Image (spheres, rainbow, N blue to C red):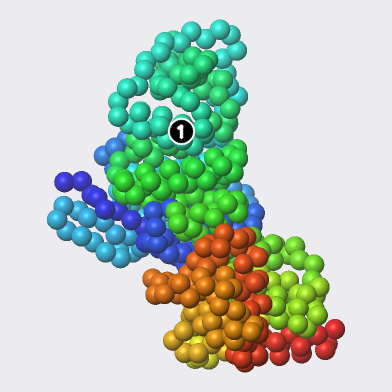
Amino acid sequence: MPISQQQIKTIQIEKLKNLQTLSINLTEGPLIALMGVNGVGKSTILHALSCCYKPDGVQRKDYKFSEFFLPNTYALWNDSRFSITISYRDGTRVYENIERQYQKQERWTPRYDNRPERYVSFIGIKSCVPDIESDNTKTFLALTLREQLDNNSVRILDSCKYVLNIPYERLAICKSHSNKEYLGVLRETIGYCTSLSMGSGEQRVFKILSEAVRCPKYSLILIDELDLLLHENALKRIVKKLYEIAVARNLQIIFTTHSMVMVDLLEYVKIRYLLQTPNTTLVQTSISTDSILQLTGDVQRPIHIFVEDKLSQAIINEICSGLNCKRFVQTFLFGPAINAFTVIAGKVLNAELDDKMVVVMDGDVYVSEQDKIDRIKEVITGQAYITQRDEVLHAILQYNLPQQQKPELFIRNGVLSLSREILPDQHEFRIVLNEIGVVEDDHKYIDDAIKRLDIDYNVGLSKVIELFAKTDVWENFIAPVRAWIESVLKTM
């Protein structure tokens, strides 16, 4: 019985090119997007993962470390060390959290024959080169055509039709006299065309989706720069289609990308954002466009405030309006609360934290000082970094939120407590906030109200917070943040 149910759970890199002390969890979903600025090490991770397995019974390329880490005069790759944690089923026996270590001194270990078996496919940048540029034939090329009518070919055609929004009708293989094969597709209006006349983006979509459909179940597919050559709509569609295929076939797909479109696709893909510091590589589990801009240094205003979401961003805007200082303040989203520690740790370790930068947490998780200290110790390890951990702790603020409450529920109840003189019974926000009873997620109290009123989301948030600012609980709720902003303004 073949090995099945395979999954890489984590990769932990001690040293590999410029990556150091890095740990990435790869278990949250079938699609993982590695993001980060150029040179941070995204492709290096894919290269390492490509070489972790030997081919199984299905024919595929055997990736060797020397293919991606070629020894040369200036890089022997000695002292490279990393490990993966895997799970799999062999017959009736299930193996969980098995660690496999890889390293190089004079040679890579373990020996290639001692690697675990799995079907792995690496789709690199070379796949972006269209056949017309890679083919050496310069004269008339006689081709024979064989239509592909099997179920997998139909699935590939339908998937590409959806992603590229092109009315394909049939898939074919075109073969030359030298037995070289080219992709052929029948289009509704122009007849058959081959990959020799396809655009590079169109050809790459076929390569990626063909691999996802035809590879064995439980395979590992690694794609470098998924967004290359694709416009935004096609990129969104290929992510959704890859998710659908991966779920149906138990695939694990990991890809690199620079596209901020991923922020809008969190239902399908989980983000791992890499941030390089002098001594370690940090990983965030969520990222936004604003955070990317901040991390790459594209900022204009002197006061930088990191917040969890757009609701908190609206609260900061309201505070700044009251203090007449919006022109000095720029806010950035960092996603789930757990990312607060990674963001500020990165700033501290890069010596970029100053007295005009702070993280503001909602105050519903990591509430106590000890909670924060424990999490900071997980992000910045080692006795030598006590000072840095203290810097991170002092750069984190939170709203004064009652225990066991989410900010959305607290804000909703606060708005409904307003007098009828301020918020009349017939006011639409009072009506919709009253109508929303118990919800499965407290975060939806505000979002659902805005959706019911069918207004722009940012405008709706602003109106809700304007009302919340008139409540009796507003001043106490914002007190720590307001006090910090006032203290910074006095130094300017």
Q: Residue 407, relative to residue 97: is it above or below?
A: below
Report x, y in % for residue 141: 52, 9
Q: Nearer the viewer, residue 189 or 30?
A: 189
Q: Nearer the viewer, residue 293 or 403?
A: 403
Q: Residue 330, relative to residue 36: is it above or below?
A: below
Q: Residue furthest right?
A: 492
Residue at 48% across, 20% down: 187
Residue at 60% across, 54% down: 260
Under mark 1, the amino acid is Cys
Q: Is residue 72 visible?
A: yes
Q: Nearer the viewer, residue 85 or 66?
A: 85
Report x, y in % for residue 198: 55, 24
Q: Is residue 207 visible?
A: no
Q: Nearer the viewer, residue 218 or 108?
A: 218
Report x, y in % for residue 263: 55, 57
Tell me if 213 is positioned left or right of 325 in this view.
left
Q: Residue 403, relative to residue 126: is it above or below?
A: below
Few, some or many residues within 10 Å of mark 1 (<14, 14–19, 20+): many
Q: Quadrant of the C terminus?
A: bottom right
Residue at 70% across, 78% down: 318
Residue at 42% across, 10% down: 144
Tell me if 15 is positioned left or right of 37 in this view.
left
Q: Residue furthest left?
A: 92
Tell me if 145 is positioned left or right of 388 in this view.
left
**Which residue matches tag 1?**
160
Report x, y in % for residue 419: 59, 86
Disc 1, SS: helix
